[in-house]
Amino acid sequence: MKKISLGISQCLLGEKVRFDGGHKRNRYLTDVLSKYVEFQSVCPELAIGLGVPRKPIRLIVTDGQDRIRGVENPDLDVTDALVAEAEYAAARMPDICGYVFMQNSPSCGVYGLKRYGSNGYGMDSKGRGAYAKRFMELMPLIPVEEAGRLNDAGLRENFITRIFALHDWRENLQENPTAKKLIDFYSRYKYQVMAHHVPSYFAIGKFLANLSGRPIGDVNREFIQLLMTALGHQASRKGNTNAMMHLRGYLKLHISKLEKEELSHLIESYGQGMVPMVVPLTLLKHHLMTLDNPYLKNQTFWSPHPDDLGLRNYVLER
């Protein structure tokens, strides 16, 4: 498989580009996910000319606006330079399928970045790094995550699921879409979408029900926005259980009573948080793969990402 292009904060690869001359290497990214992705790394602070090591900067609210200024020298304002770097990076990486940012960074922080007042005191944690904010505005389609949040098994699986889905679309539908290719593509994702967000499952089906009279390029662009929004909802145990129960229905006439009871017990045990998803999913897939049903066999729900990433070997919290 062609490697997936993924944007990343350079320090997460072990490069010593932090303000203190250190790095924040993330071994899951460099040692595990790297088998499937090709990293496009950026340190925006280094790119705009702040050296290594360098004086720290932080988000300071000035006249009601978020500005990235020097801690020791508040007259230093690098906000506009970071915004410009984000615009340059977005133009340079048009085909990335996701981005991993460094948390708590005044340039790259995405969630809960601390904001300070001009008096030096902390105000709240509602900020976002200037580079990350502008990059996300320019590329709203791509999944983004912070490295620290990837320690959460559910968030990690959700992010990686989305980057593989977007890569799939880029490889098979982004160029030269047709109505048939679009329908066939979504047919593979139906149960995966059901697991993530049932309302989206119905909404996308309705959207694709009548493609006549609309330019296929416009339909395709709207479709991928709907799909990525749907997958942006984290699949819960309840959602995964619902999808597996629906898939179990195809076995009604094909397995014995004892096999049905065993399968139902495992699905229910997963729903109660007693076993990881891989346990019932493996048995369900074993039974369904014996049926002569290409629609079922091609569902991305079985493997939305490579099995060796171990993303379904955990018991989700919810």
Image: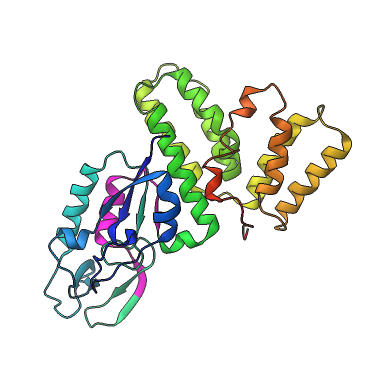
Q: Quadrant of the N terminus?
A: top left
Is 27 located above or below residue 33 in the figure?
below
Q: Is residue 70 above or below residue 220?
A: below
Q: Is residue 128 magenta?
A: yes
What residue is rendered at 22% in x and 52% in y?
86
Horizontally, is 64 left or right of 222 in the view?
left
* Quadrant where the image shows the C terminus: bottom right
Q: Relative to 102, is 241 on the left or the right? A: right
What range is drawn magenta here? 124-146
| Residue 266 visible at all | yes
On the image, the x and y values in percent for residue 207 come to 49, 28
In the figure, 186 relative to 126: above or below?
above
Residue closer to the observer: 60 or 173: 173
Number of labelled discs?
0
Residue 225 place in picture, x, y as percent = 41, 38
Task: Reply yes or no: does residue 101 show up in magenta.
Answer: no
Residue 45: percent from left, percent from top: 20, 63
Res 211 visible? no
Identify which residue, 166 or 139, lies in the foreground.
Answer: 166
Residue 166 occupies which quadrant of the picture? top left
